[in-house]
Image (cartoon, grey):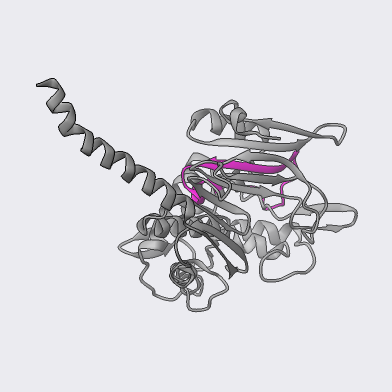
């Protein structure tokens, strides 16, 4: 009786084995697509395993993000809000606004999407010019603060009409998340989405290995031509974002002014952290925390990381002698390849 049962099961087992081998071979033979282009004033590179390119659909999703959050798009929701016009928000805008508000709370305001007037005054963003005077900084600080805006019934309410929103420190990461969701929806499991240096990965690369992402070594490189790597990270099924005051800055009077503005003081940060790389489940989250850590400095950043173990960070800083040093979350140790 037992032998008869085995004989009945053999064809089924054989079918199962053949089917599994067929699926694995199909997966291995399926090509990887390489899409690239420009969005949000930067470049994107998207690699994914699929029979054909879906770049048109990817661009359509990214355009939705642009239509909600781009300060350079005159017809975007955020542009209407910044001009004081009555406009109804949508799901994308509200998702980013709520996440930004949550991270602002968790970082004591170090991450703040109302910092735009100060950013502009310091010559980053839309215009350049002379550094603002103390009087100007003090005046602008009066209209900066994430608690000066709130979302009520799909509309933004401001305590002062001059308050501006700037989602540039979270929008690229959110764009990566949006593309990743599209790929998942299409059943694509192996991919790497990169927009302006922010990254989301899933599955394996063309080499049948986990995705490896480099972290650029800090240097005075405003033109971004020096791409020497500080380290390489094994980023599997994670999002990664980096913020660094070595990428965008200018010198005046022999002093280096960073692109990261501290909302509390109104001045560019002047502390030891040169680069903050954050790993998280969502890229928008990693993007925002990377900016926040650049504002907060080493001790405060470490405190937030201790309270939020779902986050991992790789921080490059300058010691008292000007030498580069590294601190990273203990949970990140097995992800460092170089």
- Which of 333 and 222 lies nearest the eye of the viewer? 333
- Please give the name of the residue rendered at 86% of the width and 58% of the height, measured from the top-left corner: 252
Q: Position of residue 187 (x, y in %)?
A: 37, 55
Query: Any magenta on residue 269?
Result: yes
Q: Residue 221 at what x, y percent from top left?
A: 81, 55
In the rendered view, does 138 fall on the left or right side of 219? Answer: left
How many numbered marks are there? 0
Image quadrant assignment for residue 43:
bottom right
276, 27: nearer the viewer: 27
Question: Residue 132, can we see it?
Answer: yes
Q: Quadrant of the N terminus?
A: top left
Residue 114 vs 15, above or below: the answer is below
Residue 273, percent from left and from top:
72, 40
Name the residue rendered at 50%, 59% in the picture: 31
Answer left or right for 99 relative to 220.
left
Above or below, 6 relative to 182: above
The answer to whether residue 150 is seen in the rendering is no
Q: Specify the segment rendered in magenta.
A: 264-286
Whether 147 is among the magenta residues is no
Query: Horizontal placement of 192 versus 158: left or right?
Result: right
């Amino acid at each position: 009786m037992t032998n008869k049962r085995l004989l009945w099961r053999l064809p089924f087992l054989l079918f199962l084995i053949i089917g599994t081998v067929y699926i694995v071979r199909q997966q291995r033979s399926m090509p990887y697509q390489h899409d690239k282009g420009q969005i949000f004033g930067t470049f994107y590179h998207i690699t994914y395993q699929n029979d054909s390119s879906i770049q048109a659909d990817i661009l359509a999703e990214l355009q939705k993000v642009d239509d909600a959050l781009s300060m350079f798009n005159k017809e975007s929701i955020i542009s209407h809000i910044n001009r004081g016009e009555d406009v109804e928000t949508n799901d994308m805008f509200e998702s980013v606004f709520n996440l930004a508000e949550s991270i602002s709370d968790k970082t004591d305001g170090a991450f703040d999407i109302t910092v735009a007037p100060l950013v502009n005054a310091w010559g980053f963003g839309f215009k350049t010019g002379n550094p603002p005077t103390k009087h100007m900084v003090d005046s602008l600080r009066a209209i900066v603060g994430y608690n000066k805006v709130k979302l009520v019934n799909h509309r933004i309410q401001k305590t002062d009409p001059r308050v501006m929103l700037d989602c540039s420190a979270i929008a690229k990461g959110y764009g990566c998340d949006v593309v990743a969701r599209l790929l998942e929806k299409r059943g694509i499991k192996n991919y790497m989405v990169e927009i302006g240096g922010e990254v989301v990965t899933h599955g394996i690369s063309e080499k049948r290995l986990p995705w490896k992402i480099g972290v650029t070594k800090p240097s005075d490189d405003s033109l971004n031509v020096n791409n020497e790597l500080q380290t390489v990270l094994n980023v599997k099924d994670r999002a990664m974002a980096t913020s660094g005051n070595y990428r965008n800055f200018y010198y005046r009077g022999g002093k280096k002014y960073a692109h990261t503005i501290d909302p509390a003081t109104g001045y560019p940060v002047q502390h030891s952290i040169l680069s903050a790389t954050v790993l998280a489940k969502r890229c928008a989250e990693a993007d925002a925390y990377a900016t926040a850590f650049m504002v907060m400095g080493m001790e405060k950043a470490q405190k937030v990381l201790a309270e939020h173990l779902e986050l991992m960070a790789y921080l490059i800083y300058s010691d008292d002698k000007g030498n580069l040093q590294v601190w990273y979350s203990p949970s990140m140790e097995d992800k460092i390849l170089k």
